[in-house]
């Protein structure tokens, strides 16, 4: 089995810079009431497109088009560790994953908590 890792922070920032250079980037909160959906296209303020992608993750609960879907998010936690003797250059996936990120640093995780929806790390997840 093979796995991979995409540095989504770098991907998003690089694509954002590209869109800025093309004068195609707007930084604003999305106003759902400004979206007009037609059979063959959508219109949002002064933009017209064939399709729209609303990549909102758990924020979908605030989206009036999708907030009725039965979404129940989980909280996942991970650790950043330094392990000079581990010497991994591949991702290991078992009950947890180990992701090498360079300089003997590794991301190790993740837990899944269906009850706690906060973004505060927990001692229980650290022990797990």
Image: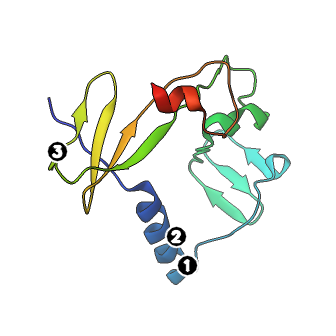
Counting residues from the start of the chain, the first of labels 1 and 3 encountered is 1
Q: Is residue 7 left or right of residue 47?
A: left
Image mark count? 3
Where is residue 52 drawn, in percent x and y? 60, 48
Q: Residues within 10 Å of mark 2 (few under 14, many from 20)?
A: some
Q: Residues within 10 Å of mark 1 (few under 14, many from 20)?
A: few
Quadrant including the N terminus: top left
| Above or below, 41 relative to 29 | above
Q: Do labels 2 and 1 touch, CB within 8 Å?
A: yes
Q: Residues within 10 Å of mark 3 (few under 14, many from 20)?
A: few
Residue receiving disc 2: 16
Measured in 3D between alpha carbons, the distance from the residue under mark 2 to the one under mark 3, in whole angstroms, is 29 Å
Where is residue 2 drawn, in percent x and y? 16, 35
Quarter of the figure with residue 97? top left
Residue receiving disc 3: 90
Q: Which residue is painted at 34% across and 51% down in the image?
A: 6
Q: Is residue 87 left or right of residue 83?
A: left
Where is residue 50 drawn, in percent x and y? 56, 50
Q: Do labels 1 and 3 touch, CB within 8 Å?
A: no
Residue receiving disc 1: 20
Quadrant including the C terminus: top left
Q: Mark 1 falls on what kind of element?
A: helix
| Above or below, 118 relative to 88 | above
Q: Is residue 18 left or right of residue 44?
A: left
Q: Nearer the viewer, residue 55 or 124?
A: 124
Q: Mark 2 falls on what kind of element?
A: helix
Quarter of the figure with residue 117? top right
Measured in 3D between alpha carbons, the distance from the residue under mark 1 to the one under mark 3, in whole angstroms, is 34 Å
Measured in 3D between alpha carbons, the distance from the residue under mark 2 to the one under mark 1, in whole angstroms, is 6 Å
Mark 2 vs mark 3: give the one in front. Answer: 3
Q: Nearer the viewer, residue 46 or 31?
A: 31
């Amino acid at each position: 089995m093979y796995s991979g890792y995409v540095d989504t922070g770098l991907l998003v920032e690089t694509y954002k810079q590209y869109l800025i250079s093309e004068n195609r980037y707007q930084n604003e909160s999305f106003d759902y009431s400004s979206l007009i959906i037609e059979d063959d296209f959508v219109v949002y303020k002064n933009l017209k497109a064939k399709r729209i992608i609303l990549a909102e993750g758990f924020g979908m609960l605030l989206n009036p088009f999708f907030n009725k879907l039965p979404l129940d998010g989980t909280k996942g936690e991970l650790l950043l560790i330094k392990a000079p003797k581990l010497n991994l250059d591949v991702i290991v996936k078992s009950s947890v994953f180990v992701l090498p990120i360079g300089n003997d640093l590794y991301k190790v995780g993740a837990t899944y908590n269906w009850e706690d929806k906060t973004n505060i790390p927990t001692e229980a997840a650290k022990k797990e």
